[in-house]
Image (cartoon, rainbow, N blue to C red):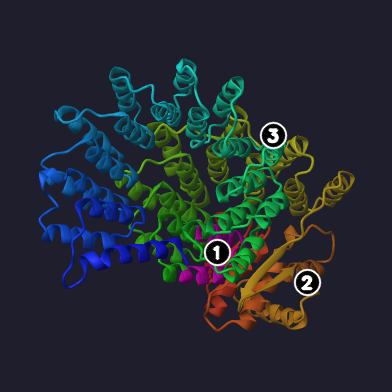
Amino acid sequence: MSALSVVGRRLAKEIRPSLFDTNPVLPSLERANKLLKLCADSSNLRVGESIHAQLIIRDQASRAENLFQANSLINLYSKCGKVIRARKLFDIMTERDVISWNSIMWVYLHSGFESEVLKMFKSMFFSGEPMPNEYIATVVLGSCSVGRSIEEGKQCHGYVLKAGLLSHEFVQNALVYMYSRCLRVEEAIRLLDEFPHPGVLAFNSALSGILDHGFAREGTDILRRMAQEDLRWDSSTYVSVLRLCSNLRDLKSGLQIHGHMLRDGLERDIVTNGVMINMYAKCGKIEYAQRIFDGSMTRNVVLWTSVMDAYYQNKCFEEVMNLLTKMDLEGVSPNEFTFSILLNSTADLSLLRHGDVLHGRIVKSGFKNHVMVGNALINMYSKSGSLGDAEKVFSRTTYRDIITWNMMICGYSHHGMGKEALKTFSNMLISREIPNYITFSGVLCACSHSGLLQEGLYCFNRLMKQFGVEPGLEHYTCIVALLSKAGMFAKAEHLLRTAPVEFDTVAWRVLLNACYVRRNYSLGKRVAEFVVEMDPKDVATYTLLSNIHAKLKEWEGVAKVRSLMRDRQVKKEPGVSWIEIRNVTHVFVSEDSQHPEIRRIYAKVREILSKIRPLGYSPDVAGVCHDVEEEQKEDNLSYHSEKLAVAYGLMKTPERSPLHIFKNLRICDDCHSAMKLISSLSSRVIIIRDAARFHHFRDGECSCGDYW
């Protein structure tokens, strides 16, 4: 029997003979107040409302002499989340004491209306009613912490000093937490130094406030100061220190803290276990995190979500999906955080059908309007190739945060729809949402994919400065891509050599790929040699350099690149494509021979290629990196993994239904040309996600406009 049902039975037993009988013997006011407190503590609104109704009938709900009763009613509605009712009761009170003010401020704070707390505090101060005490000060400081209102927090600090309330330990804790939460670490440490004997709670407040922002380095300062006091840690301290180890990815210290917990015999609860799972996950020790989970006596939705997040952080996406089945078997229902992790795992696996099933379950469970779930749905549909469904989720989202806008902009970017991304960005600015680092990464990437040179340069040179966003590696890399794809190789190379960031091989490879596509082979060779010196293990650069030599029919150069790869033990990743049909994923490699229906698939490929030749298809044999006969080169091109996947999709799916193909490498020129013609021949939409972006083939055209 649950605790709530026990409370309900007790309330029924207390109330039935006194309030609901035909000839009730009404309880005393003291008894009614006790019943109201019991209802408040158990959040039993229905019974509490019944008591309130009886008090109104007896005309005892609003008398001045019943101040304690009015406070009990405010407390009831506060703890049941009924903010408006609590405020109405407060407003009609002819007399208020400090408990009345504290109750209404408490409900505002815990309902997310921290600004109302500050307004109430000012009203109380100037009303001439009882002066704020230490409890009021704690609530007000809490609201300053949540809203990061440092100036109001300083004013409250001044009142605390003037009113002589600093001697209360919980006021000290609230002050330290407020300064820490507002990132005034020096002030927090100064307060700790000023307190005659700061307790462990004060240090916990400082550490927790800083870690809420993810500032690990400042957290080590607090921890060092705490060690000087030689205080005995409690469970909250251990939780905060484990969070610090997580942020620092400090496995050694995390293991030591775990050992101290075992030595001290600290009882592990759900919160402690969850933090330990997160710590081991951040440090890459997923097996340790699993052991903590397996050893937990109580496994509620919080703990299940923690272990799912641990696997997600370590890119074990399939295991995340498997955990959902186990969770269902134990009868634990997912919450919004669980669904968010599951959707993001589905996105990284590109499992559109699984995502659809999760979406249906979310609607059924009532979580579709949660912001983080909506954001995860947009991400899942975008990465799974169903941009139309992502747009539907976005359009139906009633509340959008910065992540919502970023998800949609980046979704358009990955699908090469630059104009749509810029339109969404414009709507974002109209809605007065402030763009951040990730926003501009998505916008600039969209411009580079779509060849929107002027728009991209305007965002980079003007808008980023206007919104105070400092350009980083991702932004400069997008500009390199934008310039090089536009054929402005000199400017792109100049930017790579002069920009105030340290470029990685990815940025240089962007220039190299543009040289290959736009046939600037001399610059491409020079860039490739530079990148190989920078990173001798970068297989993509060797591949592009080999392709350049092949285009020029420099077979000695191709052989030299291959010899260099063998000497340096660099292996080219084989091309792999996959397609999901009826919840089964079919994987293909180039010139595959393992699939059970491979003969029929090869026959289908030959049939398709013979039909698109009259439409203008000519195999691009110039890109084949083998010095063999032309016929052999054509055979090599015919059975690339994406062609096999498309052929199988045409065999196994209904006519005119879209095909979703995923590939681990960039699609080659020949397959790109073939897919445009196949889409026209079959009257199908063919969506291929390669290593760089999505390509939507429809009616003989590609969404990239051959700009890729």
For residue 237, side relative to residue 363 (left or right): right
Identify the element where label 3 is drawn.
Answer: helix
User: From the viewer's perspective, is residue 279 above or below residue 20?
Assistant: above
The numbered mark at residue 115 is none
Q: Amino acid at mark 2?
A: Asp
Dividing the picture into quadrants, the one containing residue 283 is: top right
Label 3 crowd (10 A; few <14 / some 14-19 / many >=20)? some
What type of secondary structure mainly makes up the magenta span? Answer: helix
| CA separation in Å, label 2 and label 1 | 24 Å
Dividing the picture into quadrants, the one containing residue 665 is: bottom right
Residue underneath mark 3: 253
Magenta segment, which residues?
Answer: 339-361
**Labelled pair 2, 3 in contact (Cβ < 8 Å):** no
Q: Of label 2 and label 3, which has the lower sequence position?
A: 3
Residue underneath mark 1: 384
Q: Of label 2 and label 1, which has the lower sequence position?
A: 1
Residue underneath mark 2: 592
For residue 484, side relative to residue 438 (left or right): right
| CA separation in Å, label 2 and label 3 | 49 Å
| CA separation in Å, label 3 and label 1 | 40 Å
Q: Amino acid at mark 3?
A: Ser
Q: Position of residue 151 (x, y in %)?
A: 32, 25
Q: Position of residue 214 (x, y in %)?
A: 53, 36
Q: Of label 3 and label 1, which has the lower sequence position?
A: 3
